[in-house]
Image: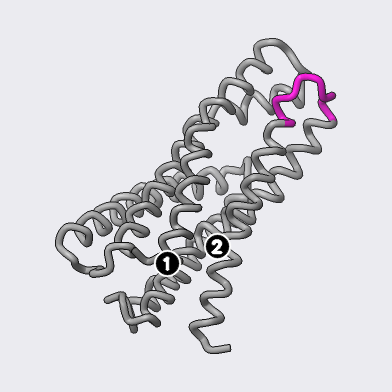
Amino acid sequence: MTGYEVLLWVHVLLFVYWLGADIGVFISARSLINENLPVPGRAIAAKILFTIDMAPRTSHVMMLPIGFSLAAAAGISPITGVWLVLVWVVGLAWLALTWYIRIRTGTVTGRTAERFDVWFRAVLVVVLIVTGLVSLIADAPFSENWLALKIGLFGIIVASGAGIRLTLKPFGPAFAQLMSDGPSPEVNDTLRSAMRRSYPFVFTIWTLVALLALLGIAKP
Protein backbone atom coordinates (compact mmCIF):
# COMPACT_ATOMS: atom_id res chain seq x y z
CA MET A 1 0.00 0.00 0.00
CA THR A 2 1.14 3.52 -0.75
CA GLY A 3 1.24 6.20 1.93
CA TYR A 4 -1.87 7.78 0.44
CA GLU A 5 -3.75 4.47 0.59
CA VAL A 6 -2.79 4.01 4.24
CA LEU A 7 -4.08 7.49 5.06
CA LEU A 8 -7.28 6.80 3.15
CA TRP A 9 -7.78 3.52 5.03
CA VAL A 10 -7.31 5.29 8.38
CA HIS A 11 -9.70 8.02 7.24
CA VAL A 12 -12.39 5.42 6.52
CA LEU A 13 -11.80 3.74 9.90
CA LEU A 14 -12.22 7.09 11.63
CA PHE A 15 -15.65 7.49 10.03
CA VAL A 16 -16.61 3.98 11.16
CA TYR A 17 -15.52 4.45 14.76
CA TRP A 18 -16.89 7.99 14.94
CA LEU A 19 -20.43 7.30 13.75
CA GLY A 20 -20.70 3.67 14.88
CA ALA A 21 -19.41 4.26 18.41
CA ASP A 22 -21.45 7.45 18.73
CA ILE A 23 -24.62 5.44 18.16
CA GLY A 24 -23.44 3.12 20.95
CA VAL A 25 -23.00 6.15 23.21
CA PHE A 26 -26.52 7.30 22.33
CA ILE A 27 -28.01 3.92 23.21
CA SER A 28 -26.08 3.77 26.49
CA ALA A 29 -27.21 7.30 27.33
CA ARG A 30 -30.82 6.20 26.99
CA SER A 31 -30.19 3.76 29.84
CA LEU A 32 -29.05 6.60 32.10
CA ILE A 33 -32.50 8.20 31.99
CA ASN A 34 -34.41 4.91 32.23
CA GLU A 35 -36.32 5.21 35.50
CA ASN A 36 -37.05 1.47 35.48
CA LEU A 37 -33.36 0.63 35.86
CA PRO A 38 -31.95 0.44 39.40
CA VAL A 39 -29.24 2.92 40.33
CA PRO A 40 -26.40 0.34 40.08
CA GLY A 41 -27.55 -0.53 36.56
CA ARG A 42 -27.53 3.11 35.56
CA ALA A 43 -24.05 3.49 37.07
CA ILE A 44 -22.79 0.57 34.95
CA ALA A 45 -24.37 2.14 31.85
CA ALA A 46 -22.53 5.38 32.63
CA LYS A 47 -19.18 3.57 32.79
CA ILE A 48 -19.89 1.88 29.47
CA LEU A 49 -20.89 5.21 27.93
CA PHE A 50 -17.75 7.04 29.03
CA THR A 51 -15.55 4.22 27.76
CA ILE A 52 -17.22 3.99 24.34
CA ASP A 53 -17.37 7.77 24.03
CA MET A 54 -13.59 8.01 23.66
CA ALA A 55 -13.81 6.32 20.24
CA PRO A 56 -15.86 9.08 18.55
CA ARG A 57 -13.94 11.75 20.47
CA THR A 58 -10.63 10.38 19.22
CA SER A 59 -11.91 9.92 15.68
CA HIS A 60 -13.36 13.42 15.65
CA VAL A 61 -10.04 15.01 16.63
CA MET A 62 -7.91 12.93 14.25
CA MET A 63 -10.10 13.75 11.26
CA LEU A 64 -8.36 17.11 10.85
CA PRO A 65 -4.69 16.02 10.52
CA ILE A 66 -5.62 12.92 8.50
CA GLY A 67 -7.97 14.89 6.25
CA PHE A 68 -5.48 17.65 5.56
CA SER A 69 -2.76 15.05 4.91
CA LEU A 70 -4.99 13.35 2.33
CA ALA A 71 -5.72 16.68 0.66
CA ALA A 72 -2.01 17.55 0.57
CA ALA A 73 -1.13 14.14 -0.90
CA ALA A 74 -3.77 14.67 -3.60
CA GLY A 75 -2.32 18.08 -4.44
CA ILE A 76 -5.50 20.00 -3.62
CA SER A 77 -4.45 21.71 -0.38
CA PRO A 78 -2.13 24.68 0.19
CA ILE A 79 -1.35 23.28 3.65
CA THR A 80 1.84 21.34 3.02
CA GLY A 81 5.34 21.03 4.46
CA VAL A 82 5.84 22.89 7.73
CA TRP A 83 2.19 23.96 7.83
CA LEU A 84 1.04 20.36 7.62
CA VAL A 85 3.46 19.43 10.40
CA LEU A 86 1.91 22.22 12.48
CA VAL A 87 -1.56 20.81 11.83
CA TRP A 88 -0.34 17.44 13.14
CA VAL A 89 1.24 19.02 16.22
CA VAL A 90 -1.98 20.86 17.03
CA GLY A 91 -4.08 17.77 16.29
CA LEU A 92 -2.03 15.49 18.53
CA ALA A 93 -1.97 18.12 21.28
CA TRP A 94 -5.77 18.37 21.04
CA LEU A 95 -6.01 14.57 21.21
CA ALA A 96 -3.79 14.51 24.32
CA LEU A 97 -5.98 17.22 25.87
CA THR A 98 -9.12 15.22 25.09
CA TRP A 99 -7.75 12.13 26.82
CA TYR A 100 -6.40 14.18 29.74
CA ILE A 101 -9.88 15.62 30.33
CA ARG A 102 -11.33 12.10 30.32
CA ILE A 103 -8.73 10.76 32.75
CA ARG A 104 -8.92 13.79 35.08
CA THR A 105 -12.71 14.19 35.01
CA GLY A 106 -13.98 15.78 38.21
CA THR A 107 -10.61 17.18 39.31
CA VAL A 108 -9.48 20.81 39.40
CA THR A 109 -6.92 20.27 36.63
CA GLY A 110 -9.50 18.40 34.59
CA ARG A 111 -11.96 21.30 34.80
CA THR A 112 -9.21 23.76 33.86
CA ALA A 113 -8.29 21.63 30.85
CA GLU A 114 -11.94 21.43 29.86
CA ARG A 115 -12.28 25.24 29.91
CA PHE A 116 -9.22 25.53 27.68
CA ASP A 117 -10.75 22.92 25.35
CA VAL A 118 -13.94 24.98 25.09
CA TRP A 119 -12.00 28.08 24.02
CA PHE A 120 -9.90 26.11 21.56
CA ARG A 121 -13.02 24.63 19.97
CA ALA A 122 -14.63 28.08 19.73
CA VAL A 123 -11.62 29.40 17.82
CA LEU A 124 -11.52 26.27 15.65
CA VAL A 125 -15.21 26.63 14.75
CA VAL A 126 -14.66 30.20 13.52
CA VAL A 127 -11.51 29.30 11.58
CA LEU A 128 -13.07 26.28 9.86
CA ILE A 129 -16.39 27.90 8.93
CA VAL A 130 -14.78 31.12 7.70
CA THR A 131 -12.17 29.19 5.72
CA GLY A 132 -14.86 27.05 4.14
CA LEU A 133 -17.06 30.02 3.22
CA VAL A 134 -14.19 32.11 1.84
CA SER A 135 -12.97 29.16 -0.23
CA LEU A 136 -16.44 28.60 -1.68
CA ILE A 137 -16.76 32.26 -2.62
CA ALA A 138 -13.21 33.07 -3.74
CA ASP A 139 -11.87 29.61 -4.69
CA ALA A 140 -9.03 30.17 -2.23
CA PRO A 141 -7.27 28.99 -0.17
CA PHE A 142 -9.05 25.74 -1.14
CA SER A 143 -10.11 25.69 -4.78
CA GLU A 144 -12.09 22.43 -4.68
CA ASN A 145 -15.63 23.32 -3.64
CA TRP A 146 -16.35 19.89 -2.14
CA LEU A 147 -13.27 20.18 0.08
CA ALA A 148 -14.18 23.73 1.12
CA LEU A 149 -17.66 22.50 1.98
CA LYS A 150 -16.23 19.65 4.06
CA ILE A 151 -14.08 22.10 6.01
CA GLY A 152 -17.02 24.38 6.74
CA LEU A 153 -19.28 21.49 7.71
CA PHE A 154 -16.62 20.14 10.03
CA GLY A 155 -16.73 23.49 11.80
CA ILE A 156 -20.49 23.06 12.26
CA ILE A 157 -19.86 19.59 13.69
CA VAL A 158 -17.43 21.02 16.24
CA ALA A 159 -20.02 23.69 17.11
CA SER A 160 -22.70 21.01 17.50
CA GLY A 161 -20.42 19.14 19.90
CA ALA A 162 -20.22 22.33 21.97
CA GLY A 163 -24.02 22.50 21.84
CA ILE A 164 -24.22 18.99 23.30
CA ARG A 165 -21.84 19.96 26.09
CA LEU A 166 -23.88 23.08 26.87
CA THR A 167 -27.27 21.34 26.94
CA LEU A 168 -25.90 18.48 29.06
CA LYS A 169 -24.39 20.83 31.66
CA PRO A 170 -27.17 20.10 34.23
CA PHE A 171 -26.81 16.35 33.58
CA GLY A 172 -23.57 15.79 35.53
CA PRO A 173 -24.70 17.30 38.87
CA ALA A 174 -28.09 15.61 38.58
CA PHE A 175 -26.51 12.22 37.86
CA ALA A 176 -24.12 12.66 40.80
CA GLN A 177 -27.14 13.35 42.99
CA LEU A 178 -28.79 10.22 41.64
CA MET A 179 -25.73 8.16 42.58
CA SER A 180 -25.51 9.60 46.09
CA ASP A 181 -29.15 10.11 47.11
CA GLY A 182 -31.05 7.78 44.82
CA PRO A 183 -33.75 8.58 42.28
CA SER A 184 -36.36 11.30 42.70
CA PRO A 185 -38.88 12.84 40.30
CA GLU A 186 -36.86 16.08 40.19
CA VAL A 187 -33.57 14.33 39.39
CA ASN A 188 -35.15 12.09 36.76
CA ASP A 189 -36.83 15.10 35.13
CA THR A 190 -33.53 17.01 35.00
CA LEU A 191 -31.71 14.06 33.45
CA ARG A 192 -34.42 13.45 30.89
CA SER A 193 -34.79 17.13 29.98
CA ALA A 194 -31.04 17.68 29.53
CA MET A 195 -30.72 14.57 27.39
CA ARG A 196 -33.62 15.50 25.14
CA ARG A 197 -32.28 19.01 24.56
CA SER A 198 -29.05 17.48 23.27
CA TYR A 199 -30.79 15.35 20.61
CA PRO A 200 -30.92 18.01 17.84
CA PHE A 201 -27.15 18.49 18.11
CA VAL A 202 -26.54 14.73 18.14
CA PHE A 203 -28.65 14.18 15.03
CA THR A 204 -26.97 17.14 13.32
CA ILE A 205 -23.56 15.56 13.89
CA TRP A 206 -24.70 12.17 12.57
CA THR A 207 -26.18 13.79 9.45
CA LEU A 208 -23.11 15.91 8.75
CA VAL A 209 -20.66 13.05 9.33
CA ALA A 210 -22.57 11.00 6.75
CA LEU A 211 -22.53 14.01 4.41
CA LEU A 212 -18.77 14.43 4.85
CA ALA A 213 -18.29 10.81 3.81
CA LEU A 214 -20.50 11.32 0.75
CA LEU A 215 -18.61 14.46 -0.30
CA GLY A 216 -15.31 12.66 0.07
CA ILE A 217 -16.49 9.86 -2.24
CA ALA A 218 -18.49 11.85 -4.81
CA LYS A 219 -16.26 14.96 -4.90
CA PRO A 220 -18.99 16.98 -6.70
Against 191, is 100 above or below? below
Label 2 is placed on what type of residue? Ala
196 relative to 96, above or below: above
Q: Nearer the viewer, residue 23 or 91?
A: 23
- Which quadrant does the N terminus fall into? bottom right
Residue drawn at the location 44% of the way across and 69% of the way down? 67
Q: Is the C terminus in the top left, top right, bottom left or bottom right quadrant? A: bottom left
Q: Which contiguous range is marked in magenta?
A: 31-40
Residue pictured at 54% horizontal, 31% vertical: 168
Would residue 100 be seen by someone viewing this image from the given angle? no
Q: Residue furthest top?
A: 185
Q: Secondary structure at mark 1?
A: helix
- Would you say residue 39 sits in the magenta stretch? yes
* Amino acid type, callout 1: Val
Q: Secondary structure at mark 2?
A: helix
Q: Position of residue 205 (x, y in %)?
A: 49, 45
Question: First in sequence: mark 2 or mark 1?
Answer: 1
- The image's colouring method is one colour
Q: Is residue 52 left or right of residue 126?
A: right
Q: Which residue is mark 2?
A: 96
Name the residue at 71% across, 50% down: 51
Residue at far bottom of view: 2
Residue at mark 2 to residue at mark 1: CA–CA distance: 10 Å
Q: Position of residue 68 (x, y in %)?
A: 39, 71
Disc marking residue 118? none
Q: Is residue 111 visible?
A: yes
Q: Residue at x 49, y 52 (%)?
A: 209
Q: Residue pushed farthest left?
A: 138
Q: Which residue is mark 1?
A: 90
Where 23 sits versus 87, above or below? Answer: above
Task: Label the magenta part by its dominant secondary structure.
Answer: loop
Which class describes the residues within 10 Å of circle 1: few (<14), some (14-19), or many (20+)?
Answer: some
